Image (cartoon, rainbow, N blue to C red):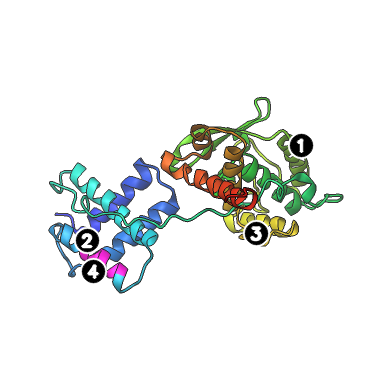
Amino acid sequence: MSTLAEHTQHFLDYIALQRQYSPRTVDTYKKSLHKFLATLPENAPLEAITTASIRAFVWKLRTEEKLVPASIGLHVASLKSFGKFLVRNHLMESNPAGTVPIPKKPQRLVSFLSQKDLQESHFPELDNPTLPMVRARVLLELLYGSGLRISECQNLTWMGLDFSANTVRVIGKGRKERIVPLTHTMKNWFKLYRDKLGEAGRMPTLKGPVFLNEQGEAHNVRTLRNDISTLLKSIGWEGKASPHVLRHSFATHLLENGADLMSVKEMLGHSSLATTQVYTHVSAERLKESFKKAHPRA
């Protein structure tokens, strides 16, 4: 008879191999489940996973560890998925986490740059650019121009780029594929970038990563984040200089200029429209600010 630890490992293998969750997501689920299992008696049977034990775990996270709702929500989501797996495999009759609510996250407005901040004239001219400088500009075009996530940029291959159609094929969360338009300036930046790779002795291949390091492998995310941070600071941006700020800016500027919400959802690769709707709140808040400043009765 399988132990609780073995059932947990079977679940982790399932989401990694069959559901093709990213290694980062699998690791998050693993840490959440192990944290919960540590609250149960040693060598506890599967039946020890009950709604009551899960609620006690959530209470501990909230009161003793003082976790924020978003962090608690990740733990609850992991347990809900594990419970579904157990029911599907006829190991339990019902999901013990099924009725445990996921804490609501407080609504917060996303951070983004203005359209004026991101005008081409704000960026320094590259008279004799280095490879990292050009790489940063290519990243800018993908993050702000096409709305990619930084992890999607890291995993991008040359085969995913179609310059004749001016599109990029992206493999997003949950291995979902989407096709997103490229900006009209992207082709020139990619040409310059390929030239710089060649000068550095790095030969791109069709199935190889776009962001190629000295070892012929994909650059790690930290390097790409640093590229963007350096670039944003070079134009005087004093806010959070992260790749996701550019993705937020992409969505916000599309909506401000009349794009429909469903199209923005598809381009961002969101599975739920509710996730995309946060950007409508951003635009609404900016409208309110403009109204208060300009209207005599505001």
* Label 4 Cα neighbours within 10 Å, binned few <14 / some 14-19 / many ≥20: few
Question: How far from the left and from the top, in percent, is residue 278?
Answer: 48, 47
**Secondary structure under badge 1?**
helix
**Distance of mark 1 from mark 2, alpha carbons?**
54 Å
**Secondary structure under badge 3?**
helix
Q: Main secondary structure of the magenta part?
A: helix
Residue at 19 percent across and 58 percent down: it is: 3
Question: How far from the left and from the top, in percent, is residue 177?
Answer: 49, 34
Q: Tell whether position 60 is magenta.
A: yes
CB atoms of marks 4 and 3 within 8 Å: no
- Disc with the residue nearer the chain's start (3 vs 2): 2
- Frontmost residue, 256 versus 133: 256
Residue at 68 percent across and 41 percent down: it is: 204
Inspect this view and state whether residue 132 appears: yes
Give the magenta-colored segment's residue range: 54-62
Which residue is identified by label 4?
A: 39
Is residue 113 shown left or right of residue 128? left
**Distance of mark 4 from mark 3, alpha carbons?**
39 Å
Residue at 42 percent across and 42 percent down: it is: 274
CB atoms of marks 3 and 2 within 8 Å: no
Q: Nearer the viewer, mark 4 or mark 2?
A: 2
Using the image, determine if residue 69 lies above or below residue 23.
below
Mark number for residue 54?
Answer: 2
Q: Nearer the viewer, mark 3 or mark 2?
A: 2
Which residue is identified by label 3?
A: 226
Which residue is identified by label 1?
A: 188
Q: Which amino acid type is marked by label 2? A: Ile
Mark number for residue 236?
Answer: none
- Disc with the residue nearer the chain's start (3 vs 1): 1
Is residue 121 shown left or right of residue 59? right
Question: How far from the left and from the top, in percent, is residue 267?
Answer: 54, 36
